[in-house]
Amino acid sequence: MDFVEKYAVKVPNAIIVSGVTDRDKDKEVFEFLERHGTIRRVLSVDDDSSAFYKSQIVEFESGAAVEILAPKLPYLLQSTDNPDVSYRIRALTDVYTKTVGGSVTEAYISNLKGLAKLSGKDFEEVLREALSTIGKTIEAAETAEINPENDAADQTCPVVGSTQLGASPSVLTELPHPAEPIQGAFQRPMRPNLTPQILSPTDLNPPEVQKVVVEHVVKSVEKTSHAHSTLRLRAFSGKMPRPYSEADYETWRSHVDLLMEDTSLSELERTRKILESLLSPASDVIRPLGPEATPADYLNLLDSAFGTVEDGEELFVRFMNTLQDHGEKPSAYLLRLQVAVNHTVRRGGLEPHEVNKQLLKQFYRGCWDDNLLTELQL
């Protein structure tokens, strides 16, 4: 429960003041507010988890005071005693709906994602069903507003004859035939029977609009999720001996290759990630290229400074002679092979389509764990 609900604040009758210093000099802001209406109470928000923390909510006796202030809001009141102090006055209705409404929407989408995960359905399908339910709710609300008028229009007016007004409808006398109009007399033109148009859920929420909304939400969720899962490069400086927290050049270079293959990143984002991962002296090597250089320009210069000078054939021979060290885990050995084969492909010693074949072949050749090989063969 938030601060407004906890103290049952009448949001339409309240404003929120920021910049209050809790001193006697703050009385001028309350004197300013009292010119527009009677203040019922002042609440200080001391809950650090609230979006209105360190602000004060001023509730008037009537909403008329807020209506008078509304054309001026948001209003910045400068302190006459201290020019460095100013008070920001806003309508609580505007601030509360934006703050709480945004959190409610995020929580609703999060719940829908959890429901999709538990039910095994696509998030897009669950979101479309939710939009359809919202459309039906809107239709029901509009129908409830229209029906009272229709019921009143459909009621039959009692015929006043010998029966007195106000008598029970059960004793009212009805004419057997409609009365004929008097010839020559003035007759009021008949009003056409106007039937209010009821919009269906399809009219309120056309499939085309639903599709656009669903695609936008799904793309936003995917983009947000991908932004958090984007590859982060380990630091590389080129120092010898290599610091424990940094990667060697071959490992760092293989991670950069994965980054370059990520089609969701722009060239500017790739460049930024590469520059963020480099420390001195590696960063000093590429500094002459400037910030306008491409990732390929940076990598070519770093390869010449920190990469091996062996050609592709020599690297392929080294890859074929890479064996598992005693006590080395198979996963660590496979990682070394992966780095070696990537370096070989980069130097032209092996075609990319032969990587998996050669990698598996060398793993069987160089692995000394017979039990693991038996399990892999099974």
Image (spheres, rainbow, N blue to C red):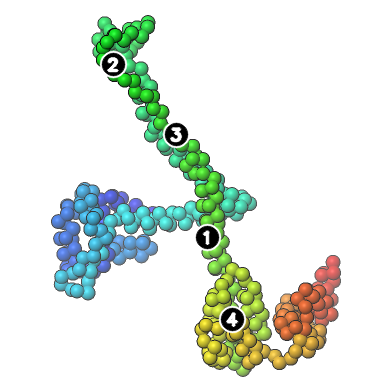
**Disc 3 to disc 1, C-alpha distance:** 34 Å
**Disc 3 to disc 2, C-alpha distance:** 32 Å
**Disc 2 designates what residue?**
187
Instruction: Indicate the amino acid at tag 1.
Output: Ser
Pointer 1: residues within 10 angstroms few (<14), some, or many (20+)? few
Pointer 3 or 2: first along the chain: 2
| Quadrant of res 184 | top left
Instruction: Indicate the amino acid at tag 2.
Output: Gln
**Disc 4 to disc 3, C-alpha distance:** 60 Å
Instruction: Indicate the amino acid at tag 4.
Output: Pro
**Disc 1 designates what residue?**
220
Query: Which of the two residues, 65 or 315, is positioned nearer the viewer here?
Result: 315
Q: Element type at marker 3? A: loop
**Disc 3 designates what residue?**
198
| Quadrant of res 85 | bottom left
Residue 1: give x, y in percent of width and height.
Answer: 38, 54
- Residue at left 53%, top 78%? 272
Of labels 2 and 4, the one closer to you: 2
Residue 329: give x, y in percent of width and height.
Answer: 74, 79
Instruction: Say if residue 20 shows up in the picture.
Output: no
